[in-house]
Image (cartoon, grey):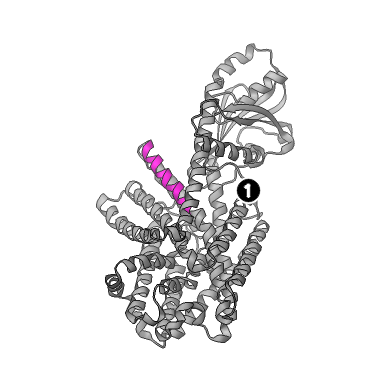
Amino acid sequence: MQPTSTAAKPLRLAAVIGVLGVVYGDIGTSPLYALQTCLGYFPASQLARADVLGLLSQMFWALIITVTLKYVTFVMRADNKGEGGILALTALAQRAAATPRTRLVLGLLGIIGAGLFFGDGMITPAISVLSAISGLQVVWPSLSNTLVEAASILVITVLFMAQKHGTARVGAAFGPVMVVWFLSIALLGTAQILKDPQIFAAINPYFAFSFMARHKLSAFIILGAVVLTVTGAEALYADMSHFGRKPIRLSWSWFVLPALLLNYFGQGALVLANPAAAANPFFIIAPAWAQIPLVVLSTMATIIASQAVISGAYSMARQCVQLGLFPRMEIRHTSATEEGQIYVPQINWLLAAGVILLVLTFQTSNNLAWAYGIAVTGTFICTNILAMFVYRRVFAWSVPLTALVFGAFLVVDLAFFGANLLKFLQGGWVPLGLGLLVAVVMTTWQRGRALIYARWTQDSLPLSSFITRLPNSRVLRCRGTSVFLTGNLDYVPGALLHNLKHNQVLHERVLFVRVNTLDIPAAPPEARALIHEAAEKIYQITLNFGFMESPNVPRALAELPGLTFDPMTTSYFLGRESIVPAGVSKLKFIRRWLFLYLARNAIPATEFFQIPADRVVELGVRIAI
């Protein structure tokens, strides 16, 4: 089987510029803090040329191996109907799994990776904005850390408050700003490289291995800072559906990667000429007259980087809801033309609170570096294992070839991850804790819904029995259409039984509707609905939606072929679940409490499925778990 491919898209300059604004904001702002963090392990008086070359060599090969080879060359080929990201990759891998146990393991990997992604979504705005604002201390050395924190929190607060208005207007400026950003950092680096062209010797991997041989354990620890060079690599894969592979690959190879390398090597040349510059080489590399404009430009670039991660968190949350990993959440569409532009209030304010708390707790970007590294490298490992499975089972690679290619990537990922684990107590616990919390929420919600479904199936009446008894019953039929949402079309929904018990009436046309989420981003039109007439004017309907779609049940029913549907004579009957703890529960106390809390705070099905409130009849259903 050959790799799936995204739809061919003509390469346009606008697409390439758009890629710079959406995809490369995170990795593009890494020069603000990556080399500075690495140099922080060496006193300025003891900084040798071989050490600077060794660090630059490790950063160069990290970009080549992790980004260029792993993500751009291999992982981006493993798309799920054009969609990227760890949950899309998980769905693709699970589809090829041979056993339920394998599907479970792959699903857990995806859940862990998604949890770490949400941790990354909190850390990226904190570390990026702090790094940009700290450039003011180069201009005004007397500026205190407290004022830098206050200014950073102000920028972050405004950023999150603006989310509800959508990103359509601001997004149009993202690409051009990032073009200016990459050109600026490339020019600043080039100006310094011209003073010491021999800095390019760092491309030789000898310097990386020599550095590790000299410093041994210290060199391994410093790998935890080197990984900051490749933060944001996952975005290349996650945002693939917006632009296609070609613009992302070309912009990386011919523009972004050269700009990053020129800046990193320029910072290295500056530090060799002036070891004191190691305190903040990114801003010191600029002439005095350009430092304040550079701070402004850096702040704009970090806002763009933060915006990309925040938008990614919204998309990830929607995928989790659709896949049954999160409870239903309010999802607002902020654009009338772009499906992907959404705003999720609950996620927005949770992220905002987390980012501000991180700024107040860690205070500087250097302190946050270890927390950032674990989030990034943990996601790298999960993606690598899932991609290895896809290449073996979907693309039919041989075992030796798969082990050789992805085994090599895994060794690099594990080295980065292990180096960051050594600083667990200094901040590395943050993303692991966040990832664990999100994973517990996902698995608890998934397990709780499975228990409710099992209890409902146990207590429900088979639809075949109901249809057999219906002609002999005294139930009155009234004009119009009734729609009953159900999780299983083979059983009678509790809302229908309650309606018959209390009102003793049934509409002349009855639709049992099941909403199904596919393991592809969007359901094709021909697969949107499956219709079966179980009895005269009684229909079983399955509506299929992709995990990137927001289900609109009334619109899908109106588009059903061969079935007349009048929205004005249609009533929707839903069971409002009242979940209570059972005497003997299969959920432990804490997880049961968590599930009940999540269930109480989930938005109603009517809102999630976009059903008009004035056409809904809700009937209470009590379920004990």
Instruction: Give the percent coordinates (x, y) of residue 206.
Output: 27, 74
Label 1 SS: loop
In the image, residue 72 above or below residue 613: below
Name the image quarter holding residue 266.
bottom left
Report the residue at 36% width, 37% height from top: 99
**From the viewer's perspective, is 352 left or right of 199?**
right
Residue 408 lies in the magenta stretch:
no
| Magenta span of residues | 100-116
Count of numbered circles in the view: 1
Instruction: Give the percent coordinates (x, y) of residue 384.
Output: 37, 54
Q: Nearer the viewer, residue 534 or 107?
A: 107
**From the viewer's perspective, is 529 left or right of 68?**
right
Report the residue at 32% width, 56% height from top: 406
Any part of residue 547 in sight = no
Q: Nearer the viewer, residue 573 or 349?
A: 349
Name the image quarter holding residue 91.
top left
Kind of residue sitting beneath label 1: Ile
**From the viewer's perspective, is 401 left or right of 367?**
left
**Residue farthest to the top?**
472
**From the viewer's perspective, is 294 left or right of 72?**
right
Instruction: Give the percent coordinates (x, y) of residue 161.
Output: 67, 59
**Residue farthest to the left?**
400
Residue annotated with mark 1:
331
The crowding category of the residue bearing disc 1, from other C-alpha atoms within 10 Å (few below 14, some 14 to 19, many at least 20), is many
Report the residue at 39% width, 40% height from top: 103
Q: Nearer the viewer, residue 337 or 137?
A: 137
Instruction: Give the percent coordinates (x, y) of residue 345.
Output: 64, 51
